[in-house]
Image (tube, rainbow, N blue to C red):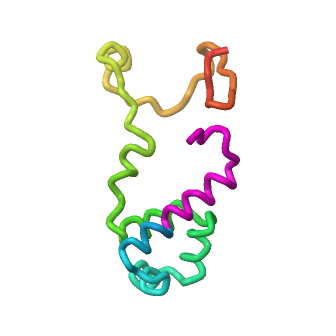
Amino acid sequence: MDLYSMSDKALLSMLGGRLRALRLRKNITQRDLAEATTLSLNVIKALEEGKGKLSTLIAVLRELGALEPLDSFIPEPLVSPIQIARMHGRRRERASGRRAKKVRSATGWQDG
């Protein structure tokens, strides 16, 4: 599946559908999930329609026992030992914008 060719709306709809399928595989009703997460039934329905907040998604995934995939969702960036030495143990907090100009393409930001 080429996720980059899909619109944001289509991706959200796909994620909502997958969330619904996961809930159904675990044989949990929307109402039971709403009660277990202290969210409203309408919030659960909206999330399954591809609408909602990240905090809502995390609460629902926690209740469904499906938080592990979040670790690979945006992986921890690897930093080389040379970069660590240059930064003297400090953590980077912002982009400087002084490096090679980046160009946005269909697959993300790339050197231009």
Task: Choose between 8 and 93: the one closer to the eye.
Answer: 8
Q: Looking at the rendering, in which quadrant would you find the N terminus? A: top right
- Relative image position of residue 7 (x, y in whole percent): 70, 47
Task: Choose between 112 and 91: the one closer to the eye.
Answer: 112
Residue shown at the point (48%, 33%) measured from the top left: 93
- Relative image position of residue 104 (x, y in whole percent): 69, 27
- Relative image position of residue 98 (x, y in whole percent): 61, 16
Q: Can residue 16 be seen in this view?
A: yes
Does 46 appear above or below 8? Answer: below
Task: Choose between 14 and 81: the one closer to the eye.
Answer: 14
Q: Can residue 59 be seen in this view?
A: no
Task: Choose between 37 and 66: the one closer to the eye.
Answer: 66
Q: Please identify the quarter of the rendering in which residue 58 is found.
A: bottom left
Is residue 15 one of those drawn in magenta? yes
Residue 55 left/right relative to 27: right
Q: What stretch is highlighted in magenta?
A: 1-19
Q: Looking at the rendering, in which quadrant would you find the C terminus? A: top right
Disc tally is: 0
Does 93 appear above or below 22? Answer: above
Residue shown at the point (35%, 24%) measured from the top left: 79
- Relative image position of residue 59 (x, y in whole percent): 43, 68
Residue 19 left/right relative to 91: right
Is residue 9 one of those drawn in magenta? yes
Predominant secondary structure, magenta span: helix
Residue shown at the point (32%, 66%) measured from the top left: 65
Does 9 appear above or below 36? Answer: above
Q: Please identify the quarter of the rendering in which residue 36 is found.
A: bottom left
